[in-house]
Image (cartoon, rainbow, N blue to C red):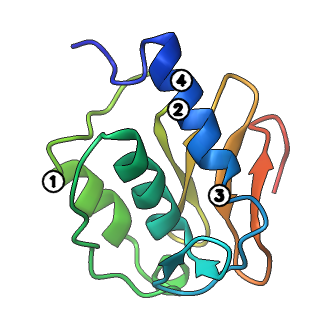
């Protein structure tokens, strides 16, 4: 299967839509550019703007679930969604899942081979590098 973000036009759209969210404050279960967003809704907003999917019915998740649940609510939702497949090596446009606590409960979207975008609690939307440690 050909990845969705395999053309220069789609990669440019990914970067452009991601950059529009930079600096948006973190707000749980929100998706308003410039006002508030969490990591799950940020990913969904970028994917919808790029045409990956047209509707978003968010998974049922709590912000602290990764601290006390062994299974990830977010990964379970991604695994059940037809727009997402697992690939062994990440490439631009991929949804990245990060373990915070006991399970993968934080996501980001890989924008290129050097950076991903995500929303962190008590911070705002930012680009980070996979080479950085958290």
Relative placement, left or right, of 104 versus 55 is right
In the image, which disc is placed on residue 118? 3
Cα–Cα gap, marks 3 and 1:
22 Å
Cα–Cα gap, marks 2 and 4:
5 Å
Determine whether label 4 and label 1 are within 8 Å by CB: no
The one nearer the camera, 47 or 33, is 33
Q: Furthest-right residue in view? A: 132
Q: Which quarter of the picture shows residue 20?
A: bottom right
Cα–Cα gap, marks 1 and 2:
26 Å
Tell which circle, 2 or 3, labels the residue nearer the N-terminal end: 2
Q: In the rendered image, which residue does mark 2 sit on?
A: 13
Q: Look at the image and tell me in which quarter the N terminus lies.
A: top left
Vertical position of residue 93 compared to residue 80: above or below: above
The tally of labels here is: 4
Relative placement, left or right, of 112 versus 122 is left
In the image, which disc is placed on residue 11? 4
Visible residue check, residue 92: no
What is the x, y in percent for residue 54?
A: 22, 53
What is the x, y in percent for residue 81?
A: 18, 51
Q: In the rendered image, which residue does mark 1 sit on?
A: 80
The one nearer the camera, 112 or 80, is 112
């Amino acid at each position: 299967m050909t990845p969705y973000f395999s053309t220069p036009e789609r990669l440019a759209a990914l970067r452009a839509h991601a950059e529009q969210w930079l600096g948006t404050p973190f707000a749980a279960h929100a998706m308003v550019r410039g006002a508030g967003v969490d990591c799950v809704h940020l990913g969904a907003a970028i994917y919808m703007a790029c045409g990956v999917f047209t509707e978003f019915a968010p998974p049922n998740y709590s912000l602290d679930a990764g601290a006390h649940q062994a299974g990830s609510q977010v990964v379970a939702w991604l695994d059940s969604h037809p727009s997402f497949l697992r690939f062994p090596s990440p490439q631009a446009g991929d949804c990245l899942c990060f373990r915070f606590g006991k399970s993968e409960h934080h996501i980001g979207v890989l924008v290129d081979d050097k950076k991903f975008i995500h929303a962190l609690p008590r911070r705002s939307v930012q680009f980070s590098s996979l080479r950085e440690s958290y």
